[in-house]
Image (cartoon, coloured by chain):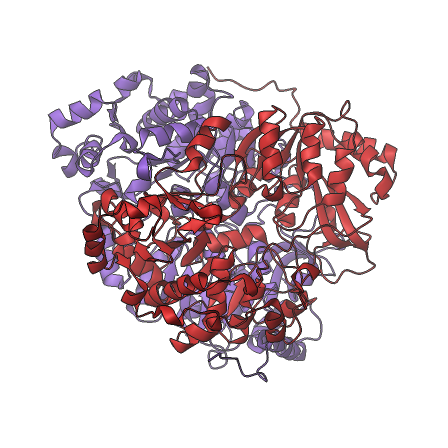
Chain colours: A red, B purple
Amino acid sequence: MTVRRDPTAPWDTARAARRARLERARGVWPDRWVPPERVTPLLEAILEPGDRVCLEGDNQKQADFLAGALARVDPARVHGLHLVLSVLALPEHVALFERGIARRLDFSFSGPQALRLAGLVQAGKIEIGAIHTYLELYARYFVDLTPRVALVAAQAADAAGNLYTGPNTEETPTVVEATAFRDGIVVAQVNERLERLPRVDIPGDWVDVLTLAPAPSTIEPLFTRDPAEIGEIQVLMAMMVVKGIYAEYGVQSLNHGIGFDSAAIELILPTYGEALGLRGRICRHWAVNPHPTLIPAIEAGFVESIHAFGSELGMEAYVAARPDVFFTGHDGSLRSNRALAQTAGLYGCDLFVGSTLQLDLAGNSSTATASRITGFGGAPNMGSDARGRRHATPAWLRAGREAPPGPGGMPRGRKLVVQLLETFREHMEPAIVERLDAWDLAERMGTALPPVMIYGDDVTHVVTEEGIANLLLCRSDAERAEAIRGVAGYTPVGRARSRSAVEALRALGIVRRPEDLGIDLRDATRDLLAARTVKDLVSWSGGLYDPPARFRRW
Amino acid sequence: MTVRRDPTAPWDTARAARRARLERARGVWPDRWVPPERVTPLLEAILEPGDRVCLEGDNQKQADFLAGALARVDPARVHGLHLVLSVLALPEHVALFERGIARRLDFSFSGPQALRLAGLVQAGKIEIGAIHTYLELYARYFVDLTPRVALVAAQAADAAGNLYTGPNTEETPTVVEATAFRDGIVVAQVNERLERLPRVDIPGDWVDVLTLAPAPSTIEPLFTRDPAEIGEIQVLMAMMVVKGIYAEYGVQSLNHGIGFDSAAIELILPTYGEALGLRGRICRHWAVNPHPTLIPAIEAGFVESIHAFGSELGMEAYVAARPDVFFTGHDGSLRSNRALAQTAGLYGCDLFVGSTLQLDLAGNSSTATASRITGFGGAPNMGSDARGRRHATPAWLRAGREAPPGPGGMPRGRKLVVQLLETFREHMEPAIVERLDAWDLAERMGTALPPVMIYGDDVTHVVTEEGIANLLLCRSDAERAEAIRGVAGYTPVGRARSRSAVEALRALGIVRRPEDLGIDLRDATRDLLAARTVKDLVSWSGGLYDPPARFRRW
């Protein structure tokens, strides 16, 4: 008994549907360049109820004009869409669900819409498929979440539809590849139509419809941290990370999550790092956005290469003037690529440093709190051990030697995953807790699993203002919990520590205080920051860094 | 004390070097289209000693003309190159090291050159940086192994240098992106120069030099397995996998490594799978090359989508006629992409099935044997738990429930990783052993770690002709070892089993025999194969599959 499909059934339904939809589109406007005021009727012609649509929302760049145009379609004609996008950041995204135009959502991060998103869930106006890490969502674009229609944003296009993204290439090529090569339809909003593009980021024959947006697409300066807001506790933690982790393991390649904690690390490389003789010995290769707080380390000669997920507003001229460090095109501007930078962060880096809101005694961390559905972004990807990695570096081998060996005593390497957190966050909420809020959230949301950012067995070091807990060296769950208590300060879980047990861990090097590392607390001042203000960053850059207005205080 | 780099030092050394090299190239030939007979002098003009060079060697496609041209350069002028490529498959690759043109190698797989490679190591003619999994090597192209020069292969180019890869896009876009956007130089060999390309796979402004190769670039039919060579033991193992794993976990998305074992699974889906009522319930989405042995499952309606690493010789017309299943361009032909398919396999799939040469009692596996340096390919990537994955599927959740919970009792999901192997391989060598040859190899090669293909704690099931060992359910190392002995047949480690312990594991469902799964050994015949010959595959395809001559036996 062998089965065979109905031999008369077609094998090109998507291609035929594409043809029919583009035919309908031509009824709205005869050319592939559609005037902005005709885009809403165009989308009504192209889209069908229940379609899976990628409305490009990257970590930074947003197809905001197309989002607005989509939010204005007639819900009687277009409804029940399945929205796939990495970052749900715009009010228009939420409006799609409020109006019933979209029904289902698969995404990675919700940023400023986290509260409203939780409201939509409670009102039953949205079905959340899953919350992904970025690279995982892109993976599914090629497996079971391929978009039927992609609405994307680029800087410019030429007559042939070739796209120039400028520095914020981000995930546009990945989204377009998934859609265009499965007989989907690609609609692009661009800021400019040019005779000749500075470079081609996406070939024109992958793009179906173009429109000149009335305003440039939104880009968020997510990776700018004002050095003025960095305190001495952050300097102290940064010193511990640089001396106790980066120097000890010889970390060559790394990713920094965004935050004042990691900005402090970047800013003490040219001072403290230099004093320790670490230039050329650590932090040579980065998978990271062009953080303005990296400028001094670059100018000091610490940084050999940076591959970027996206760009950062105001960094364009600086990046263009540092092509030995950044990946740039022949046009001179940055070429970012979120999928490839996430891959670089996963497989090409010795270390990930990230901050978290909550950490439990097993080392599990979460940024989910009861009333907000924020999502993960890229942290789970870069903050996990890449078990398929096979190339060795000194840092990776040493981390592997400190950890228990693999099955059957098989030696292996390990990625360093560092969680940085002050023991108390704002409003004196303890950051280290017995039980993550994620448990309650999972129950209320009805998700299969609590939304854990990084699982405890992927974390190698927890760093607080009190010291470093090296979880690699812990040989039991109890030892791991006591090590975390040992750096938990005056939080309830910190006060519940056994003083003698923590001292025993200190003797083993599992818990290390600043003094154990030869760090004098009196040195932990803002004087160690190579730049203390945004203006200092501009000065370091020789005037090339042009910060957005909100960061200008002079 | 703050350090600053010498302010007069340039930041565009790579760009200046690129300019100088292209200037020298123009001295050899004034146009970007260089006649093939001038390519060797051109490479002598472009390359400098010690350069890092990606000489495109994909799993299938090879830039063979450029490899030959490079092997003929004068070693007095060009020597000590650092070669980065995923597959070292051509005699010319080895010749580069024998002649001293290249000195260092970072790669993923050596296939047919495994023996000669081992010889080069022993002769001290090569330094091996590391052996990588594919995606890991691509990651490093953007971190610390960025090529200065890339020598790549495409099907066709137009006057503007736009490249058309045809179905074997493979990793060309990834290699070119890393090189072109770090001020490197991209040289492409093409089979045709066309006025107008069927589609653009790589924009022309990413490419510097082109040459019309005298013969089409080599493509290996690596993914063709003749059903005639599949035996009844493989049918039996396939039945166990389909009924005992795919059906039980409800596996929706998967990757199959290549081999007769997994080909047998593909070929019994339309017969045995259909009889079990599994169509539409399992194996809907694949990250896999267009295996000819998948044709019957596609024709039977099992397969909804396939995203491919590369193509397969002879499958071109069939793929083009099945656009609902395969990712194809508007030109009709396959668009593959190895980096994205590896990402799909890592993060988007419930399950990986692979074969191995050796497995130890901890479940560690290796294809390394004493005299061959074969490398890993993609197996470590797809055969490892993607710890950054956060989206849930039934298969992933169930595997996670069977495994011990995460730290602090945190529930999580798991990828299914199945190792398929007969207990004895050729020459009656036992496949399940106390100690992997990889230990000795590491010692002889002086590598930091034994070359393990998949670590035991990533393996969820071991399947042999004797049954299935479910390692997820094992609660201790001893239990795991006994479970593996329980399916190790008459190998020495199998004979050393405790019969009562294995029976106890059977009662727990950890070891399952065919009869425990309701499989009658008498049903395990070649009659279950939907195609028993290559000719049958051609017939299933309605004559669209056009097998290479070596597979034609009629």
How far across and how far down the image is residue B144, in percent? Answer: 47, 65
Name which residue lies at 50% across and 52% down. Answer: A343
Residue B91 makes an appearance in the image: no
Q: Tell me the quarter of the picture where residue B509 sits.
A: top left
Name which residue lies at 42% across and 50% down. Answer: A424
| Residue B85 or residue B478, whichever sits in front | B478
Tell me: residue B460, above or below residue B206: above
How far across and how far down the image is residue A126, in percent? Answer: 61, 27
Name which residue lies at 39% across and 72% down. Answer: A523
How far across and how far down the image is residue A433, in percent? Answer: 37, 42
State left or right for residue A119 relative to residue A269.
Answer: right
State left or right for residue B373 relative to residue A328.
Answer: left
State left or right for residue B539 relative to residue A331.
Answer: left
Tell me: residue A126, above or below residue B386: above
| Residue B244 or residue B333, whichever sits in front | B244
| Residue B380 or residue B292, whichever sits in front | B380
Name which residue lies at 78% across and 29% down. Answer: A20
Residue B272 makes an appearance in the image: yes
How far across and how far down the image is residue A430, in percent? Answer: 41, 45
| Residue B484 or residue A553, whichever sits in front | A553
Q: What is the number of callouts on the image?
A: 0
